[in-house]
Image (tube, grey):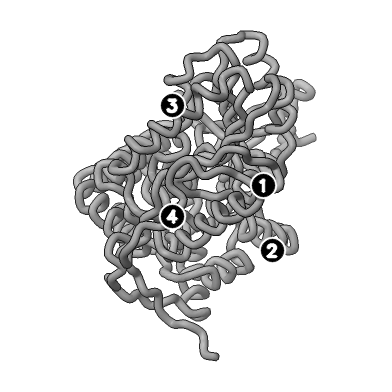
């Protein structure tokens, strides 16, 4: 059977075909990497302040095109346009952040003898392959592209095959402010990503997406000595402690599980509910699911909708109770209703794997210690949230949970410039913050001493 040579983009609201996009072949990938490699010599010698100025100008261009980008994102992924606008603005802010931080990124020095000094210089790694997802395509790509560019790397960027038009348009707005070859753009599916990860002239691969793809990239990079920066799947736990207001806790849980139809990297995937709060919290959560029904868009496509429904069906077959939702909406679109499941256990797919949809599976446990133990017993390590009025429990939680980010009393949020470092199957390396500049650079030590 011949390989597919183009992507077919389908409107997740109507099921109608929107566009067809050619998939880059092996030769196109080779040429893009070669152009980025050739452009590296001039870009690395460009003053850090000038590189930052170009990224700052690109941020302004993206901001001017925010409405266009948001509409493209809504059309290709189903993300509501207001949410998409928020993601675009977050991307603009991130580009500006790295434009400010880039020229400040510095090395260190050590004094040996009176006549000798050691310098530790941060140098760009070279050519970066940046592979980004569909669920927040501008905000995520802005961080990786911005950090790579301001530190002097050149980039070959492959946006997600589920939103190639929006991803390409965003990258083109940036590339217009850069010298030729500094930012190359390729359309395609997993085959294109695999070619870039295996390319001998690619020095760092930054990937945000599935754990299976991340593991394949990690193996490929390890084989040839390239750097891998990976944010992969998550199975984020929410612990609801006794003593909190059940209505507020249900609002937090609903936001974490249903925002963007559950298609957020750090969405709430499994809920551990301390028994003392069980009845009141579940009733409130069921009510919240109804209020969210008209506020969320479709899932990205019907294939993903089928994946979400398979998780829900598996839970019901294994004994979970369906409180709300649980059936795909009729029609050709990819809509799935906010769904609340109770009586869940760790053997169900909704608890053991990433569902990435508007599903809130609840497991009642006898006490906080049990919740903490079960939440920690997972192969993923992206993030977790704890809702508690007990300061001791909060302290115990952030010290115990083996994840990159622990949120206390808020499912979303974080300081500007904050970092994240996933663990276990969720990836490796910092994906945000000033620390991402360190990931995009390698340290060279220079030992300098006076001649005899």
Which quadrant of the figure has residue 399? top right
* Residue 21 locus on image (x, y percent): 35, 74
Q: Which residue is mark 4?
A: 327
Residue in front for this viewpoint, 433 or 354: 354
Q: Which residue is mark 1?
A: 352
Helix, strand, or loop for circle 2? Answer: helix
Which of pointers 3 and 1 indicates the residue nearer the eye? 3
211 left or right of 85? right
Which quadrant of the figure has residue 226? bottom right
* Mark nearer the N terminus (3 vs 4): 3
Q: CA distance from mark 4 to mark 1?
A: 21 Å
Q: CA distance from mark 2 to mark 4?
A: 40 Å
Q: CA distance from mark 1 to mark 2?
A: 27 Å
Q: Which residue is mark 2?
A: 220
Q: Is residue 138 above or below residue 258?
A: below
Q: Residues within 10 Å of mark 2 (few under 14, many from 20)?
A: some
* Residue 403 locus on image (x, y percent): 66, 33
Helix, strand, or loop for circle 3? Answer: helix
């Amino acid at each position: 059977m011949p390989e597919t040579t183009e992507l077919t983009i389908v409107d997740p609201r109507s099921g109608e075909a929107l566009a067809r996009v050619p998939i880059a072949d092996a030769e196109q990938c080779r040429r893009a990497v070669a152009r980025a490699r050739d452009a590296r010599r001039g870009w690395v010698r460009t003053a850090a302040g000038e590189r930052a100025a170009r990224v700052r100008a690109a941020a302004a261009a993206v901001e001017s095109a925010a409405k266009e980008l948001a509409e493209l994102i809504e059309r290709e992924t189903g993300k509501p346009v207001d949410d998409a606008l928020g993601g675009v603005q977050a991307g603009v802010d991130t580009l500006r952040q790295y434009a400010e931080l880039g020229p400040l990124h510095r090395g260190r020095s050590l004094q040996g003898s009176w006549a000798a000094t050691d310098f530790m210089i941060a140098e760009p790694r070279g050519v970066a392959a940046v592979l980004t997802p569909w669920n927040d395509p501008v905000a995520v790509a802005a961080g990786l592209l911005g950090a790579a560019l301001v530190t002097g790397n050149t980039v070959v960027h492959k946006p997600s095959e589920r939103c190639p038009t929006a991803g390409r348009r965003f990258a083109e707005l940036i590339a217009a402010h850069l010298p030729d070859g500094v930012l190359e753009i390729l359309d395609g599916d997993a085959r294109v990503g695999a070619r870039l990860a295996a390319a001998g002239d690619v020095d760092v691969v930054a990937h945000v997406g599935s754990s299976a793809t991340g593991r394949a990239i990690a193996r490929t990079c390890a084989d040839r000595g390239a750097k891998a920066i990976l944010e992969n799947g998550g199975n984020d736990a929410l612990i609801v402690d006794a003593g909190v207001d059940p209505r507020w806790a249900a609002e937090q849980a609903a936001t974490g599980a249903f925002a963007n139809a559950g298609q957020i990297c750090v969405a709430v995937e499994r809920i551990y509910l301390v028994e003392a709060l069980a009845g009141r919290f579940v009733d409130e959560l069921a009510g919240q699911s109804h209020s969210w029904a008209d506020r969320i868009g479709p899932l990205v496509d019907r294939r993903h909708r089928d994946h979400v429904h398979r998780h829900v069906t598996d839970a019901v077959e294994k004994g979970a109770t369906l409180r709300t939702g649980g059936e795909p909406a009729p029609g050709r679109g990819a809509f799935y209703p906010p769904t609340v499941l109770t009586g869940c256990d760790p053997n169900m797919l909704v608890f053991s794997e990433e569902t990435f949809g508007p599903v809130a599976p609840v497991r009642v446990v006898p006490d906080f210690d049990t919740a903490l133990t079960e939440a920690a017993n997972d192969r993923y390590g992206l993030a977790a949230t704890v809702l508690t009025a007990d300061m001791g429990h909060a302290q115990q939680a952030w010290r115990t949970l083996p994840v990159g980010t622990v949120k206390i009393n808020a499912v979303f949020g974080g300081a500007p410039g904050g970092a994240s470092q996933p663990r276990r199957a969720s990836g490796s390396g910092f994906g945000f913050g000033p620390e991402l500049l360190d990931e995009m650079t390698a340290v060279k030590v220079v030992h300098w001493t006076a001649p005899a």
